[in-house]
Image: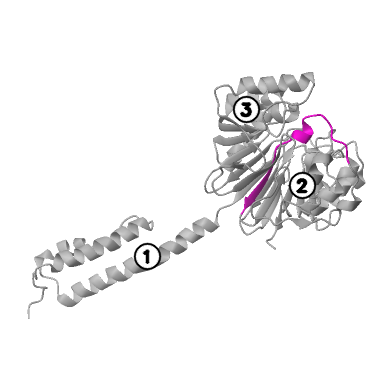
Amino acid sequence: MPDYWPEEPGRASYWSERHSEAARRLFNAGVASVYTFRHMLTAADSRSMPVRRRSLLCLAALVCSFALLALAPAARAQTKAASQLLIYAIDVEGGQSTLLVDTVTRASLLVDTGWPENDGRDAVRIQAAMSDAGITHIDHVLITHFHTDHVGGVPELVKRVEVDEFLDHGVNREDSDITRHDFAAYLKAIEGKKRRTVNPGDTIDLPGLDAVILTADGEHIAAVPGVKPTPNPWCASEPKWELDTTENPRSTGVLIRFGKFRFLDLGDLTKAKEIPLVCPENLIGTVDVYLVNHHGFNLSNSRVFVDAIHPRVAIMDNGAHKAGSPEAWETVHESPGLEDLWMLHTAEDSDAAHNSPDALIANPKGVAADGAWLKLVASPDGGFTVTNGRTRQTKSYPQR
């Protein structure tokens, strides 16, 4: 009996084709290289290798190939499970600027840009958050409304950062010189850049995230996909609030969903426009994290609204001497189910009873310098953490 495989017609090509297919499957599964059966046949061309040894090598190669194929889906699943949503509540001294980044797709959304001037202070703080998140450009900038503490930072931002698209509610509706000025400055700064007017029900293209516009230009969404409206028992007890004529009730608001995690940002929406979102039925359901409307002014944050959305954690982007009013703070703080109310600043015009503990404040009274952010890291299972940028201390909120 010969000590080698005879050169039967088709034997080598048959096994080579079979193993090449396995190699292709391994490559597609993420395995960079394999030792193929064709390599073995070439190495064995001397016909001096014993049959048993050659057979064992072939068997070992096939076993390794199938083992790697079996492990590849698990590796991909682990990579997918590592996806996180980063949310930075950036300190722009009583204005708003909130950065959201998906850690896998790198999709990014910046909601508002803070104040103008100040040597580009707010744009620099936005860039610091971008650097921490590992991004160098922004996919979308959403301007909630055309007040200077929200849109004023755009001219400085576009000098420093590439932005793919600007989103807003259309035109300025407020009859005031400062708002007309800031709206004109915004339009000039984004000349030649992509701009889209959004309406309730529109979505924002953010791979890995679900972002739906809830409010814009004084209108609100009729139904949120995936949310079943439920009767709100608190509606009868809520007073009727007058509608103001500023840009605030025109705010563009967005609901972000990341797996089971839900984040709500409605800009400076006021009480008269909050209530239709939850009365007579709650259209938006509950949320995990609520960016407190209007920096914590009592013109916003009606009890019927805050209690209906039932936030687990709230973040108030107030300034040291702007917003953080005692009435609004108490409404949010006493909301059923709220675990913590985080603040960007101590509300220095309020009292100790209506401020959170220093551990939950990014920039408490008396610190040497402002500019610390609050950083939230969410997982698709609904769990999340919040880190105080000043202390670097992190608090966990496990999935429920």
Residue 68 numbered tag: 1
Where, by quadrant of the figure, is residue 205 drawn?
Answer: top right
Q: Residue furthest bottom?
A: 1
Residues packed near mark 3 inside 10 Å, few (<14), some (14 to 19) or many (20 plus):
many
- Nearer the viewer's eye, disc 3 or disc 2? 2
Q: Amino acid at mark 1?
A: Leu
Residues packed near mark 2 inside 10 Å, few (<14), some (14 to 19) or many (20 plus):
many
Q: Quadrant location of the N terminus?
A: bottom left
Mark 1 or 3, nearer chain start:
1
- Which element type, helix, strand or loop, lies under badge 3? helix
Task: Give the residue at x 58% y 38%.
Answer: 131
**Drawn side of residue 57 relative to residue 125, left or right:** left
Mark 1 or 2, nearer chain start:
1
- Nearer the viewer's eye, disc 1 or disc 3? 3
Mark 2 highlights which residue? 277
- Above/below status of 96 relative to 77: above
Q: Which residues are magenta?
A: 241-258
